[in-house]
Amino acid sequence: MTLREDFKEMLAAVQQAIQESLLDEKNLWTNARCAAYLGYSPRYFKRSIATLKGFPAPIVLPTAEKGGDERYDPKEVKAWAKRFQK
C-alpha cells in the first residue's frame, strides 16, 4: 500500500468516526449537532428551526454564565424530523 492509499484509508476512518459521533444517541445534542443532522447551519437552526412550534424543547443545563447551555434529546429531534418524511 502506498502512502497516499494509507492516507485515504485513514481519512475515510476519521470521516466515519465523525459521522458516527454526530449521530450518537447516548449523549445530548448541541445546537451544532442538531444543525448538522438536519442539514442546516448552526445559526439557521437556532433562529429558524429550534424556535418552531412543535420542535422539541431544549434541556437547559446550568452553567456559570447566565442563561445556561441548551441541549436536545437526539431521539426527540429524529422523531420530529421523521414527521415530515413523505
Image: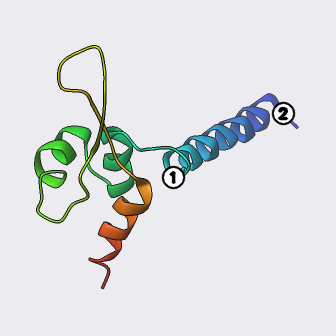
SS class of the residue under badge 1? Answer: loop
Residue 84, numbered label? none
Mark 1 surroundings within 10 Å by alpha-carbon count, few (fewer than 14), some (14 through 19), many (20 or more): some
Whichever of labels 2 and 1 marks the residue nearer the N terminus, that label is 2
Distance (Cα) linking label 2 and label 1: 32 Å
Question: Residue at the location (37% across, 62% down)?
Answer: 76
Quarter of the image where the N terminus is located: top right
Q: In this view, does 52 lie to the left or right of 8?
A: left
What residue sits right under mark 1 in the picture?
A: 23
- Whether 7 is drawn above or below 76: the answer is above
Question: Residue at the location (29% across, 77% down)?
Answer: 83
Image location of residue 34, percent across then percent down? 34, 49
The furthest residue to the right: 1
Mark 2 surroundings within 10 Å by alpha-carbon count, few (fewer than 14), some (14 through 19), many (20 or more): few
Image location of residue 52, percent across then percent down? 12, 59
Can you tell which quarter of the image residue 62 is in? Answer: top left
Can you tell which quarter of the image residue 21 is in? Answer: top right
Q: As shown in the figure, which amino acid type bears the numbered disc 2?
A: Thr
Quarter of the image where the C terminus is located: bottom left
SS class of the residue under badge 2? Answer: loop
The furthest residue to the bottom: 86
Residue nearest the viewer, comparing 9 with 65: 65
Question: Residue at the location (51% across, 44% down)?
Answer: 27
Image location of residue 53, percent across then percent down? 11, 63
Image location of residue 24, percent across then percent down? 54, 50
The furthest residue to the top: 64
What residue sits right under mark 2 in the picture?
A: 2
- Whether 1 is drawn above or below 73: the answer is above
Question: Residue at the location (32% across, 80% down)?
Answer: 85
Q: As shown in the figure, which amino acid type bears the numbered disc 1?
A: Leu
Q: In this view, does 13 lie to the left or right of 85?
A: right
